[in-house]
Image: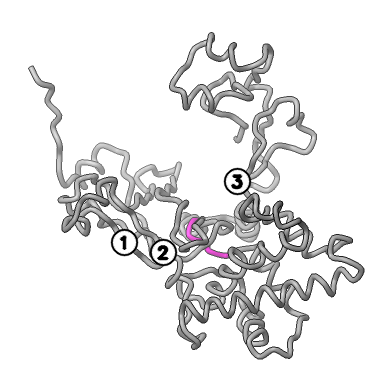
Amino acid sequence: MWRATAWFSWICCVAKAWATCRKRSGQPMWRRIVPRGCFCISTALPWSENPKAGFITTSNEMNLPRDDPVAQRKLGFEWANDARHARIIQVLSQLPKPRLEDSEKLQNDQVSLPAQRLVALLQPLQSHDPDTSAALALLRPWNGDASAASAAAALEEVWFSRYLGDAYKALRLRPSEAASFGAPDAAAMLDALEHPGAAFGATPAARRDQLLLESLRNAYHALGSLQGPDTRQWQWGNLHTNKIAHAMSAVAGADRALLDVGPFAKGGSPYTPNQSSYDPADFRQTIGPSARLIIDLSNWDNARAMNFPGQSGDPASPHYRDLAPLWLNGSYFPLLYTRAAVDAATEQIFDLVPAQ
């Protein structure tokens, strides 16, 4: 069963985050920030039980029903793109009886539906420019799997994150407006590209195609500068990396290598189930699932988990970074629950004795 909820059974609709970040709680604080009557009882929020699909999934997208009074409740105003949610539904819908191994694979899935939509727009396009034609040839057969070893993923992500959005903003906005914010909303931009309207001028489809081809050519040139002219050597993971920098790394000097973990070549994107958001300036991963959990409710000792980069916070411990390569390749370790299973797997015991 799924029910929309939050940290408390009585949800402050507007100022929960404000009060939390100020480290204050209690009714006086709530009353001072929130207009009277702006509380939602959790039992009145949307819920789902035994849906026809046979599963419940959410990926931080806007998941409240269409008829829910969102504007009145003010539960939130910003939501993640729904591409990860849609991909999970796509996969689960094809599995009549998912296994734990299917869950492992899905948590590590790196297929980008927005990338597939962009590739679909490119299929009928042609260009007399050799570089643009080469870019089209690289992307047309690609299935949207943003693996670390993929040349097509490298081109598409550079295009999408650095060039396509800027070209779209330049088309729709005055320069001062375009410069006032970063990437445009991906969902809105993709919808506009798939259904070009008056904003594209007198010949919307032709102007849309021109925008796609010109921005793609620019991305192709940029990637050539970054990874060389041989497209066979291009890899998304050569650009997109993960590095865990310790809080003391900047002052560690010679010990920095003992504290930092990585860098590692990464796959994925902000729009893949195995989320891997990044800063377009250097493509370094900024958001992703550092922990993964799969529970077998029929056998709790069959639970599986992953915790990146390791279980220990002590750089001298062998378990400080030992899970990093397993996390990268989509592996898991047993998450044991019963006393017998835990005792059998115990490697070390820490006794915390209070001072007298």
In the image, farthest residue toward the top: 28
Q: Main secondary structure of the magenta part?
A: loop
Name the spot of residue 350 as percent of width and height, x first.
Answer: 15, 36
Q: Nearer the viewer, mark 3 or mark 2?
A: 2
Task: Identify residue type, mark 2.
Answer: Thr
Task: Identify residue type, mark 3.
Answer: Thr
Picture residue at 71% right of the left edge, 25% below the top: 73
Q: Secondary structure at mark 3?
A: loop
> What is the quadrant of the C terminus in the image?
top left
Q: Was residue 208 drawn as part of the magenta stretch in this picture?
A: no
In the image, farthest residue toward the right: 202
Could you tell whether 231 is left or right of 181 in the image?
left
Residue 262: numbered disc: 1
Q: Secondary structure at mark 1?
A: strand
Classed neighbour count for the residue bearing mark 1: other residues with Cα under 10 Å, few (<14), some (14–19), many (≥20): some
Name the spot of residue 339 as percent of width and height, x first.
Answer: 25, 37
Q: Is residue 50 above or below residue 12?
A: below
Name the spot of residue 258 as percent of width and height, x first.
Answer: 19, 56
Mark 1 touching mark 2, by CB under 8 A?
A: yes
Q: According to the image, label 2 marks what residue? A: 241
Classed neighbour count for the residue bearing mark 3: other residues with Cα under 10 Å, few (<14), some (14–19), many (≥20): few
Name the spot of residue 150 as percent of width and height, x first.
Answer: 50, 76
Q: According to the image, label 3 marks what residue? A: 57
Which one is nearer the viewer's eye here, 244 or 321?
A: 244
Q: Which residues are magenta?
A: 107-111
